[in-house]
Image: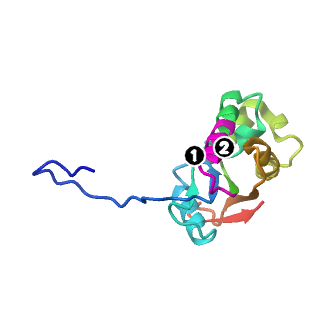
Amino acid sequence: MSTPALGVDRKIYRVLAHAKPRAIIIACPDPRIWEATLCFIHEELGLRYGEYLFPAQLGGVVALSQPVTMPYASQHYGDTLEFCFKHFPSLEEIIHINHDDCARYRDFHETIGKFFLRGAPDLSERQRRDLGLASGLAPVVAKRPLETRQFLMQYANADRTEAYFDPA
Ligand SMILES: [Zn+2]
């Protein structure tokens, strides 16, 4: 333990001495939706700080569904899960959250074209299908049985200043 040097005024922040996270959340860190995502986690999922791990993953689960085009991101996803489940035995659930108008998904769609949709009518449906895929693969990647939930954040107004989270 140390204190700020004499005469130095530092703001002090609260730190959890013990944390037993029960959920790992894979979600896109898009700054537009960061606040909404955290509010959803706290207010609807009922998880508090310390009860979840949030290793940000650009594009949410897209890395898992594009292992050939995103080998490093896909490997990173697997490594992250493996590390988290090894070091936090309290984990019992994985929650995947994708969001509407995700730049990562849009980028793939623009680069690869309609084949990226894999038969889905639009990007939103492609994302829902990826969430289902992730929910099936996560226990395999984590090498243990676990609860899975997945959600797709969608905008609630034309200005895109409000959103809701749909189970997917
Ligand atoms: Zn995104």
Tell me if 46 is positioned left or right of 144 in this view. Answer: left
Determine the residue positioned at 69% across, 32% down: 75
Tell me if 130 is positioned left or right of 30 in this view. Answer: right
The numbered disc on residue 56 is 1
Using the rendered view, name the quadrant where residue 62 is placed. top right
Q: Where is residue 21 in the image (x, y as percent from the top left)?
A: 58, 58
Q: Position of residue 22 (x, y in %)?
A: 62, 60
Residue, disc 2: 81
Q: Residue furthest right?
A: 119
Name the amino acid, label 1.
Answer: Ala
- Residue 33, relative to residue 56: is it above or below? below
Is most of the magenta stretch helix, strand or loop?
helix
User: Can residue 95 be seen in the rendering of this structure?
Assistant: yes
Using the rendered view, name the quadrant where residue 97 is placed. bottom right
- Please report the bounds of the magenta region as a residue range: 78-92
Determine the residue positioned at 57% across, 51% down: 54
Determine the residue positioned at 28% across, 50% down: 1
The numbered disc on residue 87 is none
Residue 37 drawn in magenta: no
- Element type at mark 1: loop
